[in-house]
Amino acid sequence: MKPNSTINRRLLLVHAHPDDETINNGATMAKYVANGIGVTLVTCTRGEEGEVLVPALAHLASNATDELGRHRETELANAMAALGVSDFRFLGAPTRKFRDSGMMGMEQNNRPDVFWQTNLDEAAAELVKIILEVKPQVLVTYDEMGGYGHPDHIQAHRVAMRAAELAAPEWNISKIYWNTMPRSIIQKGIDKMKELGSDFFGVDSADDLPFAKDDSLVTTLVSAGEFAVQKIEAMKAHPTQIALDGPFFALSNNLGTEVMGDEYYTLVKGEKAAPFDSEGRETDLFNGIAG
């Protein structure tokens, strides 16, 4: 798709760890970059406490050499190259680093340098600097539960929302969205994969997955099936976190790559605006924004 002249439109995404951005918004990011829209990704931590799915790289884990964060920086850069995103940053860089907090209740949560323990306004101030530089009309982040309850996802939500508030006197973000995974779509994937003798995270019902949200929460669908291949390539760029034989790739193999191109959002600030699809959902995050 040939880029157009919409560079005056700018999207800011705030995520917790490398790979979160691709799973949630890979197709959206690729679509907007291709259409000439400015896309900025802010990643809050380097994912130092992540599980290492590649046996040959097990030595990178936090309980070994503790070099996973540096490795995941490279994975993120490779993923962004696949999506065409050139503006991606770590929160606080280059002067400050926020460490991955690990899953809720882990001992690592208590380390003073982890993102979960960071003073909210201090972290938000770092993001305000980026907001005032980039001047995005649209912000995307997680819901108040961080999608599924991970401390860093919850903190990323809090930081993003607080930064938008603090920046408002100088730059008011027109629309804020939270990533949403509709229950019906997840159930469709579970049913299809079960029919084919596979499974999705080992569950029979979407109700058993913490990130499955009620369909009524979906206000907006970005349909970008033509960019699903780029999203899949970006997922492959995160091998320590996303297994090639894991549920996300199985989903695309069994349902077709188009399922990877549909990404769902809940509008929490700003006005829902036309055009709408047949189910009354916005078709673009920038609907209603002039320019």
Image (cartoon, grey):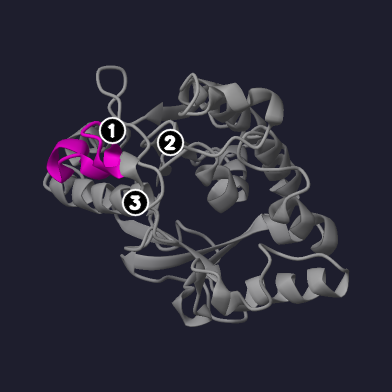
Q: Disc 2 designates what residue? A: 40
Of helix, strand and loop, which one carries label 1? helix
Residue 130 - label:
1
The residue lying furthest to the right in this view is 196
Q: CA distance from mark 2 to mark 3?
A: 23 Å
Q: As shown in the figure, which amino acid type bears the numbered disc 2?
A: Thr
Residue 143 visible, this angle: yes
Of helix, strand and loop, which one carries label 3? helix
Q: Is residue 203 above or below residue 55?
A: below
Q: Nearer the viewer, residue 91 or 83?
A: 91
Residue located at (71% from left, 56% from top): 247
In the image, the segment drawn in magenta is 109-123
- Our reading of the magenta stretch's main secondary structure is helix
Residue located at (21% from left, 42% from top): 117
Which image quarter is the N terminus in? top right
Disc tally is: 3
Q: Disc 3 designates what residue? A: 151
Q: Nearer the viewer, residue 236 or 284?
A: 236
Q: CA distance from mark 2 to mark 1?
A: 9 Å
Q: Is mark 2 in CB contact (under 8 Å) with mark 1?
A: yes
Q: Give the image location of residue 143, x and y in percent.
A: 37, 62
As for residue 51 lying within the magenta part, the answer is: no
Q: Is residue 185 above or below residue 225?
A: below
Q: Give the image location of residue 88, x and y in percent.
A: 45, 29
Callout 3 crowding tier (Cα within 10 Å): few <14, some 14–19, many ≥20:
many
Q: As shown in the figure, which amino acid type bears the numbered disc 3?
A: Pro
- Which badge, 2 or 3, is on the more N-terminal residue? 2
